[in-house]
Amino acid sequence: QSLKELMNMLCDKECEEGIRLTGLKVTRAILYMNPDQENLSVHDRNTEFERMLQNQPPSLLGDSHFALTQARVAKLGAVDVVVQCIETENPAVIMATLRLAVTLLEGGNLQVQELFAEALHHSSSQPFFIKFRSLFQESVDAIREQKRKVKQAAAEKTALLKAGIAKKTEDSTYSLASSQVHMVEVMKTMRRMCMGQFRPLQDILRSQRLNHTSFDFFNEAVQYIKNLEPELKDCIHDGDFEVVDGAIRGFLMLADSMRGPNLDNQKAISETGIFDLCDRIFARIRFEHIEKSTPDREFELEKNVFR
């Protein structure tokens, strides 16, 4: 009952952002620490809490008890919380909302997917999709702004050299990572919506038929990676692995969106220019097998990264 009341409070548009942020984190912690599973020790729960803080998937992923907890929390209103809280302009609340969505959907939980499909099927979901679209647009704008800054810095350096001015200045580092923090979680959320060949959400992410404005988020994902592609090699060289992770997660999400097979999604994605994009990536970037220092269960079989 208390958790249900918390969900109702978080959905209230008058809820203060600080309280909302804390409530989102508490709800996610409940999923990780699984208080209904009595055989977990204090040490086990502390370990799970640390995994949450490090944004790693729960170690109980795949366990039936964890799946039941996901479904129970979702039915108590966590899906509505995600749909409502994503509309905020507070970056920390947006991140907490996306991470809650990922944890709810972790493993492609069918019951949770069905609840998301029901919530997003109605025309009232328009603000959710508008916000989702804005996250893509903001990330693309940040990439373009970074390119502008790099060109401006290069032009200024050239002008100084031509003028014979050898003024020593500190090298400026233009990292994309800070401006792309939401995109990894956006891609993870979309992928988990599509996992298990769940057709309703696969279709909703391509077209929202009852909404006044419809967005094709698979096309948005491809366009995002297209804008990112020229920067990938430099990002790897500079250690901006969050940016590279966003591209990798995007491709994984697109793959899951077409499974089934979902012929409509296959056709739509094939018309986005994704083949030319892949050709450019293969032409510019060499692949090398590496051992990851930090284990990630999602990437156990995907240890090839861009080099």
Image: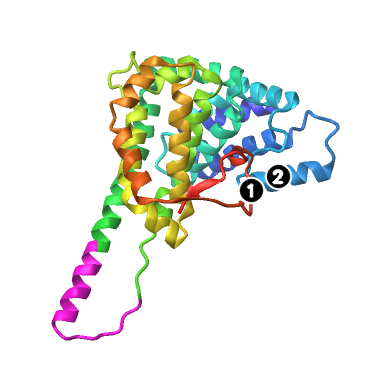
Residue of label 2: 49
Query: Which image quadrant is residue 49 in?
Result: top right
Seen in the image, is 98 located left or right of residue 165?
A: right
Q: Do the residues labelled 1 and 2 touch (CB within 8 Å)?
A: yes
Query: Which image quadrant is residue 240 in?
Result: bottom left
Q: Can you say which quadrant of the picture contains the C terminus?
A: bottom left
Element at label 1: helix
Q: Nearer the viewer, residue 197 or 15?
A: 197
Query: Magenta stretch mostly in which secondary structure?
Result: helix
Extent of the magenta region: 151-170
Q: Name the residue rendered at 38%, 33% in the picture.
A: 132
Q: State how many labels appear.
A: 2
Q: Residue 143 in the image: state x and y as whole percent.
A: 31, 50
Q: Residue 125 in the image: state x and y as whole percent.
A: 40, 21
Q: In this view, does 208 lie above or below 237?
A: above
Q: Name the residue rendered at 33%, 14% in the picture.
A: 209
Dot 2 alpha-carbon crowd within 10 angstroms: few under 14, some 14 to 19, many 20 or more: many
Q: Quick check: is 213 in the magenta stretch?
A: no
Q: Can you say which quadrant of the picture contains the N terminus?
A: top right
Element at label 2: helix
Q: Which amino acid does label 1 sit on?
A: Leu
Residue of label 1: 53
Query: Which image quadrant is residue 168 in?
Result: bottom left
